[in-house]
Image (cartoon, helix red, strand yellow):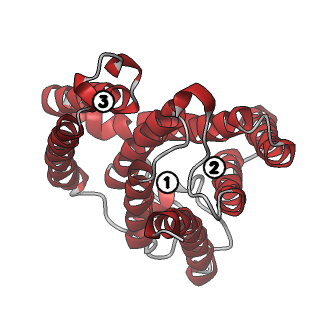
Amino acid sequence: MSSAVRTYRYLRLAMVVLVVMLLASVVGERLASGTGCFEASVSAYVHTPAQGVFVASLVALGVCMIVIKGSSDAEDVVLNVGGCLAVVVGLVPTPDPATCTASPIPMQLVPEQVANNVGAALVAGAVGLAVTVAVALRQGDLRRADFMTRRNLAGIAVSTVLLVVGIAWFVARRDGFVAHAHAVAAIGLFACIVGVVGLNARDCHRRRAPARRYLVILVLMIVLGGALVASQWFGVALWLLLAEATVIGLFAVFWVLQTDELWHVGTRAVGSDA
């Protein structure tokens, strides 16, 4: 068995462990605070003693999503976008303060934290993109006559757009970035999560058992997540927290199932996308 296959296994299982760590930190803070309530969202726990785990788990999850290669061009691009957005979610705190903790973390230095942390992430992103281009050129993929269909070009193009838009927003509208980047990135991240599951359900059409499992997870994400979002109009106080926890938990289940499906091969061969 190749080391590459083992690496795929470890990356997928690492994402499951990171999700477990994040949810365990939220539950641990709830039990330790003694307040008898939860914050309104998972993101709000960044302003509690769970801050370190929240930031570390989101950044690490983002890196894992970027590093792992999808079985198709489309899945690979969606994973890359989702990974970049996960890093932003982790590094840009939600502007809403914690309201249900005995030990809130002051928010006075949030603009300075965002300036430093996101600035460093953008520099790292630019370097990473340059390295990616250099590797693709060395492999020759961008010099092929059919390079327009290659995953390298698609990933580079999308990453470049994200980086340029992120830099422009960060530099030109810093106040708006601090206030809204977390929410925008979180919505995009959840869309990418649903997209990854949907693409796997589509690409497994020749293997009925895995396809059915992925389709069930996709339907649960959409139906349960949508129902919880809609429940806010019926006075459900923790609708956002429950919706986030549901999608995050189902995402972990998805990675467990994909790890099992691709245990011996690492990635799935997908027709024209291969």
Q: Amino acid at mark 2?
A: Glu
Question: In 3D space, how far apart are the residues under numbered discs 1 and 2 (Cα atoms)?
Answer: 9 Å
Indicate whether 204 appears above or below 157: below
73 or 272, nearer to the observer:
272
**Could you say whether the residue bearing mark 1 is in a helix, strand or loop?**
helix
Question: In 3D space, how far apart are the residues under numbered discs 3 and 1 (Cα atoms)?
Answer: 22 Å
Q: Which residue is identified by label 2? A: 244
CB within 8 Å, label 1 to label 2:
yes
- Asked if residue 95 shows in the view, the reply is no
Q: Nearer the viewer, mark 3 or mark 1?
A: 3
- Identify the residue at horizontal 48%, vertical 32% (top origin): 73
Q: Earlier in the sequence, mark 3 or mark 1?
A: 1
22 or 132, nearer to the observer:
132
Q: Which residue is identified by label 1? A: 43
Q: Position of residue 169 (x, y in %)?
A: 22, 28
- Identify the residue at horizontal 57%, vertical 34% (top origin): 191
Indicate whether 132 appears above or below 262: above
Q: Amino acid at mark 3?
A: Leu
